[in-house]
Image (cartoon, rainbow, N blue to C red):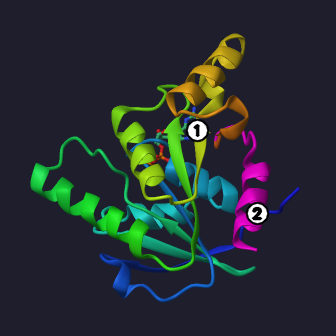
């Protein structure tokens, strides 16, 4: 079992060219409220860590963390924030897409999908876009505890199908209950190795 990821906040940036180079990087992306901060905190076993990314002025930036064991983790801004004006939304999208296309040594993108709600239209767009650009990615379904145990098998099949994947391709996690957190830590370490 992988022990907690030892993450340290490095810096925020509004474009990829402002980031320090890295040997290997894993990025976490998903719509706002999908449970990204909770998941990063759970992997690090640190309650406040990813809230750094939620500090005023940082929620719309690329937030970079370093692992003590080597490699970096990128906390990308949540997409689909409904209250933002369209022009601002377009700017964030450009920043996220620019990062995903230009970041050197980006080894994996963890695409978070809400396990209770299932993939939204924006999630499907993001997956289609990553596929079109042949960017390696893994779907992580969050909030496993919110799906009733009697409904889980069916839900797993449906969620995978909507993502054009097999059920075994999706990593189901619960930050609240700790479900599969150790497994995901192990994957992150493998991707960064
Ligand atoms: P972010 O906007 O993607 O960073 O999402 P947050 O981590 O802030 O989580 C959004 C909401 O979902 C919060 O109310 C969390 O408490 C809740 N949440 C996150 N992960 C889980 C989970 O695994 N289980 C449950 N039940 N709630 C969760």
Circle nearer the N terminus (2, 1): 2
Above or below residue 160? Residue 38 is below
Q: Which residue position holds label 2?
A: 4
Task: Determine the secondary structure under disc 1.
Answer: strand
Residue 190 part of the magenta-drawn span: yes
- Looking at the rendering, the stretch of residues picked out in magenta corresponds to 176-193
Determine whether, in the image, residue 133 is placed left or right of residue 70. Answer: left
Relative to 70, say whether 134 is above or below.
Answer: above
State whether the magenta stretch is mostly helix, strand or loop: helix
Is the CB atom of the residue marked by disc 1 within 8 angstroms of ligand 1's nearest atom?
yes
Q: In the image, is residue 187 part of the stretch drawn in magenta?
A: yes
Could you tell whether 62 is left or right of 49 in the image?
Answer: left
Residue at numbered disc 1: 142
| Residue occupying image coordinates x 47% and y 89% | 20
Q: What residue appears at the point 76 percent right and 63 percent down from the top-left corner?
A: 4
Given the current orientation, which residue lies at the most extreme top position? Answer: 150
Q: Position of residue 53 (x, y in %)?
A: 43, 65
Q: Front-most of 104 and 154?
A: 104
Q: Is residue 116 above or below residue 106?
A: above
**How crowded is the residue under tag 1: few (<14 C-alpha within 10 Å), some, or many (20+)?**
many
x 34%, y 40%: residue: 122
Residue 35 image label: none
How many marks overall? 2
State the image quarter where residue 18 is shown: bottom left
- Badge 2 marks a residue whose secondary structure is loop
Question: What percent of the width, then of the height, locates residue 93?
Answer: 27, 58
Residue 116 % position (x, y): 53, 26
Label 2 environment density (alpha carbons within 10 Å; few <14, some 14–19, many ≥20): some
User: Is residue 173 something that shows in the picture?
Assistant: no
For the N terminus, give its image quadrant. bottom right
């Amino acid at each position: 079992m992988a022990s907690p990821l030892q993450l340290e906040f490095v810096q925020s940036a509004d474009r990829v060219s402002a980031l320090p180079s890295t040997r290997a990087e894993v990025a976490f992306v998903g719509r706002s409220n999908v449970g990204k901060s909770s998941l990063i905190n759970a992997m690090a076993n640190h309650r406040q860590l990813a809230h750094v990314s939620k500090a005023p002025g940082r929620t719309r930036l690329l937030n970079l963390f370093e692992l003590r064991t080597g490699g970096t983790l990128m906390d990308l801004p949540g997409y689909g924030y409904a209250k933002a004006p369209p022009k601002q939304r377009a700017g964030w999208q450009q920043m996220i897409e620019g990062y995903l296309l230009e970041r050197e040594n980006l080894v994996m993108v963890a695409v978070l999908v809400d396990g209770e709600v299932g993939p939204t239209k924006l999630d499907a767009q993001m997956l289609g876009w990553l596929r079109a650009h042949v960017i390696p990615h893994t779907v992580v379904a969050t909030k496993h505890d919110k799906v009733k145990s009697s409904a889980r098998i069916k839900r797993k099949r449906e969620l995978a199908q909507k993502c054009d994947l097999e059920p075994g391709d999706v990593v189901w996690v619960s930050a609240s209950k700790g479900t599969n957190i150790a497994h995901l830590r192990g994957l992150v370490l493998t991707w960064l190795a």
